[in-house]
């Protein structure tokens, strides 16, 4: 039996982070949604079904269109599942499926030729009772809010593979002055370095530090926290409970309960809270976001021009890939910033900043020239030894054309 992940139409509600990646590559807890499903099922996904324009990029990210001619049974699992009942899913018989309470397909087992019916709305399934505890993420901020609980749920799947500190001496690359609290819930991968006078506190959740991470002196890292491969914390950084930094992030200042997808720069002081930053984002010095209204009310956000009541008291900045800010930029509670937006100047930008924007609240916001945006994208990737793939550029050009029509006149 092969594991295939799939997207459903609700991936639009994870804007702007699902513009350049399938939903299963989003992050929470101690991994991506894909990794978390694989840990629970004890299987490695062999393919993924996603939006047509994204297929080439998804393949480049490691999970392309599956090959169906191999035959055999296929286990289809919704890529935005936060939790599942592994026993119930693995015990499905061919032709059986599990729906959510609002009739969204969570998982199904099919014969390979049954996939031919998916384009017609899906094959006929014998629907099984949905087990308790199977949860679909509904919106982007769900991934931020569930992060502490998700990290606790992930830890048992990793615990046997991780060499936890416990009572052992600090590993090579960790200064003897570093203070560990609840060390039995802290893992530091070989090749990571932790400078003098840092505090790693796993009292309220596990801490996993991947290989090649560099933590400067006088940093505080509170769990639950995941710090991805090659990331760096500058001296005095405070990661305050419930953070997930993807690979190759550069972080300073105060960060609380936030997700950085990867290759994100927040290299200066400033507060980032209950936020989700896409890849290749860059926050200028003293950029701050609010994550709580003064009246402590539920936060509303604007998604593609539509007001959405999050039902949450804490919602910070949601920023798409390649977006950037100038120094001293301020973001109001629940601000959404689109792909390739470049924002600067005094005052608060709008609660929703369209993709490919250029400017700020004082000078006004204009369109960001596509060719200049792509030129910058090439430069920032080259600085990390990477290149802008042709399939990525093709997708960006496609999205730019969509945005021009969608946001025209707004």
Image (spheres, helix red, strand yellow):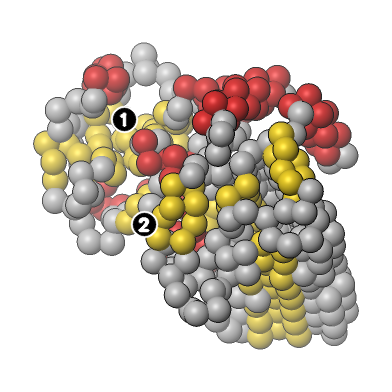
Between discs 2 and 1, the one toward the N terminus: 1
- Horizontal relation, residue 301 to residue 184: left or right: left
Task: Please state, as top left, top right, bottom left or bottom right, where the C terminus lies in the image.
Answer: top right
Name the residue rendered at 32%, 56% in the picture: 135
Q: Is residue 237 above or below residue 330?
A: below
Residue 251, numbered circle: none
Q: What is the secondary structure assignment of the residue under circle 1? A: strand
Q: CA distance from mark 2 to mark 1?
A: 20 Å
Label 2 vs label 1, nearer the camera:
2
Q: Is residue 56 above or below residue 147?
A: above
- Horizontal relation, residue 293 to residue 229: left or right: left
Q: Position of residue 184 (x, y in %)?
A: 60, 79
**Is 185 or 65 nearer to us in this picture?**
65
Query: Dot 1: few (<14), some (14–19), or many (≥20) neighbours within 10 Å?
Result: many
Q: How many marks?
A: 2
| Whether residue 273 is visible | no
- Horizontal relation, residue 269 to residue 145: left or right: right
- Horizontal relation, residue 256 to residue 311: left or right: right
Name the residue rendered at 77%, 54% in the picture: 362
Q: Position of residue 8 (x, y in %)?
A: 36, 36
- Residue assigned mark 2: 83
Q: Position of residue 112 (x, y in %)?
A: 29, 21
Q: Is residue 20 above or below residue 370?
A: below
**Is 313 or 393 nearer to us in this picture?**
313
- Residue assigned mark 1: 74
Quarter location, residue 245:
bottom right
| Whether residue 110 is visible | yes
Name the residue rendered at 47%, 66% in the picture: 299
């Amino acid at each position: 039996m092969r594991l295939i992940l799939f997207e459903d139409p609700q991936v639009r509600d994870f804007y702007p982070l699902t513009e350049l990646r399938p939903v299963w590559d989003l992050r929470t807890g101690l991994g991506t949604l894909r990794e978390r499903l694989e840990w629970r099922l004890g299987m490695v996904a062999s393919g993924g079904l996603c939006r047509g324009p994204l297929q080439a990029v998804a393949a480049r990210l490691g999970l392309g269109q599956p090959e169906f001619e191999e035959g055999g049974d296929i286990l289809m699992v919704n890529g935005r599942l936060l939790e599942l009942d592994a026993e119930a899913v693995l015990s499905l018989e061919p032709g059986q499926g599990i729906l959510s309470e609002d009739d969204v397909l969570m998982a199904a087992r099919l014969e390979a030729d049954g996939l031919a019916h998916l384009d017609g709305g899906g094959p006929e399934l014998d629907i099984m009772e949905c087990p308790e505890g199977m949860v679909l993420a509904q919106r982007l901020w769900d991934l931020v809010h569930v992060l502490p609980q998700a990290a606790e749920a992930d830890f048992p799947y990793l615990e046997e593979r991780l060499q936890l500190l416990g009572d052992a001496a600090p590993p090579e690359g960790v200064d003897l002055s570093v203070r560990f609290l609840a060390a039995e819930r802290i893992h530091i991968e070989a090749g990571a370095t932790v400078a003098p006078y840092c505090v790693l506190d796993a009292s309220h959740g596990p801490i996993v530090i991947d290989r090649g991470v560099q933590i400067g002196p006088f940093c505080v890292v509170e769990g639950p926290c995941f710090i991805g491969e090659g990331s760096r914390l500058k001296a005095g950084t405070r990661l305050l409970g419930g953070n997930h930094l993807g690979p190759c992030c550069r972080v300073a200042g105060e960060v609380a309960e936030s997700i950085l997808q990867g290759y994100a720069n927040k290299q200066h002081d400033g507060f980032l809270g209950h936020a989700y930053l896409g890849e290749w984002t860059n926050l200028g010095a003293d950029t701050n976001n609010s994550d709580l209204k003064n009246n402590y009310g539920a936060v509303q956000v604007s998604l593609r021009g539509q007001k959405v009541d999050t039902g949450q008291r804490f919602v910070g900045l949601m920023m798409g890939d390649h977006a950037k800010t100038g120094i001293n930029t301020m973001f109001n509670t629940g601000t959404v910033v689109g792909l390739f937006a470049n924002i600067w100047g005094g005052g608060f930008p709008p609660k929703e900043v369209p993709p490919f924007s250029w400017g700020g609240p004082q000078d006004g916001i204009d369109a960001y020239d596509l060719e200049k945006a792509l030129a910058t994208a090439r430069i920032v990737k080259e600085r990390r030894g990477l290149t802008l793939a042709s399939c990525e550029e093709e997708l960006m050009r496609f999205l730019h054309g969509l945005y021009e029509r969608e946001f025209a006149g707004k």
